[in-house]
Image (cartoon, rainbow, N blue to C red):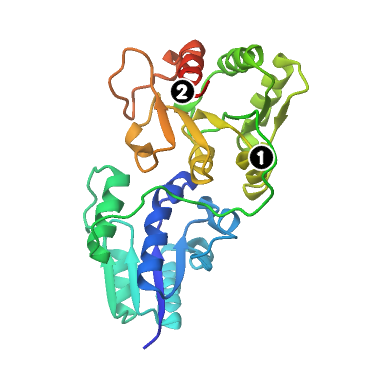
Amino acid sequence: MNDKNLIIQLRPGIGDMCVFLSSIHEIIKKENKNFTLLTKKRTRAKNFLQEDNFVKEVVYIEDLKKGKFFGNIKILHFLKQNQFNKVFIMHYGIKYFILCKLAQVNKVLHYNFIKKNENISKKIYNTTLSWLNIKKYDQKSKIKYTGEVYGQNKILIGIGSSGQSRRWDTKNFVELISKFNKLGNFDFYILGGKSEKNQSDEIISQINQNNIKCLCDYEIYDTFKYIKNSNFYVGTDSAFMHLSSALNVRTYGLFGDTPTNYSEYSNLIKPIIPKGYNSITHGSNAMKKIKPEDVFITIKNNLF
């Protein structure tokens, strides 16, 4: 019998992959077999999991399919060619289940065929418990990084986001950084994607000090040495919020338009929501109501 197994995780974001990573690790540890991870390019899994002890092969689904019909044939060919013994589908819907059955996969474990509006971190946790027949596991995701750890008094500033409603204004970041500059001698690293480079440049220009560095042009893995050597992350609910937590860095996430339950999988993530709100959900559109003074006080009271 082939000892190759497959995990299919098709939520597209880097943050999504971080939420699912502890379950992926637990499955591979428990099964003690060779595993391939099938996911999407936007997760950047090949980049940030390159030192991972458990995930040895990552395949991007975009590399398998081009075109809806022929894409499915190519996925079926991939499944047949690898002769996977067992497949774990962390994804709603029936398509991949049918493809696995057509490929004569011995055992297919899957989400429900019909998508439900559920807490994604609780869903994958409880599903993994059921799949593996265990009572608990550590849900805090961990990314392996073996680079040098050399300093402190460094603060990560996360400005990136996957949508306009999750962004925090430049003036808010400038005010927050200015407050920390008055508190002590810190260096600041600005984290974001290439599309946030202009905002980063504007923040640096307004701060006008030599203790702040933009990392928006860096590859994900190349930011890890800065993340690992920082005291904490503060910024938007973004890929770098999840990556910082997975690299064992204390994380303060600004939640004004996404449910805080996206952070529940890690005790290192502390959600900060606007004053006067009991909860936040999609469509709250309340990032403008998160004040720099409140963020600063929350972090100061927790860390200093």
Is 262 situated left or right of 181 in this image?
left
Task: Give the SS element for disc 1.
Answer: helix
Count neighbours of disc 1 (C-alpha within 10 A) and say few if under 14, some if 14 to 19, many if 20 or more: many
Q: Nearer the viewer, residue 110 or 31?
A: 31
Is 252 situated left or right of 187 in this image?
left
Is 4 rendered above or below residue 232? Answer: below
Task: Find residue 84 and report its image quarter.
Answer: bottom left
Is 197 rendered above or below residue 138? Answer: above
Residue bearing the label numbered 1? 226
Q: Position of residue 6 (x, y in %)?
A: 40, 70
Q: Position of residue 213 (x, y in %)?
A: 72, 30
Task: Give the SS element for disc 2.
Answer: helix
Q: Nearer the viewer, residue 60 or 137?
A: 137
Residue bearing the label numbered 2? 302
Q: Residue at x 69, y 48 (%)?
A: 148
Q: Amino acid at mark 1?
A: Tyr
Q: Amino acid at mark 2?
A: Asn
Is 190 rendered above or below residue 181? Answer: below
Q: Residue at x 46, y 27 (%)?
A: 166
Q: Residue at x 39, y 52 (%)?
A: 20
Observer-side mark, 2 or 1, equals 2
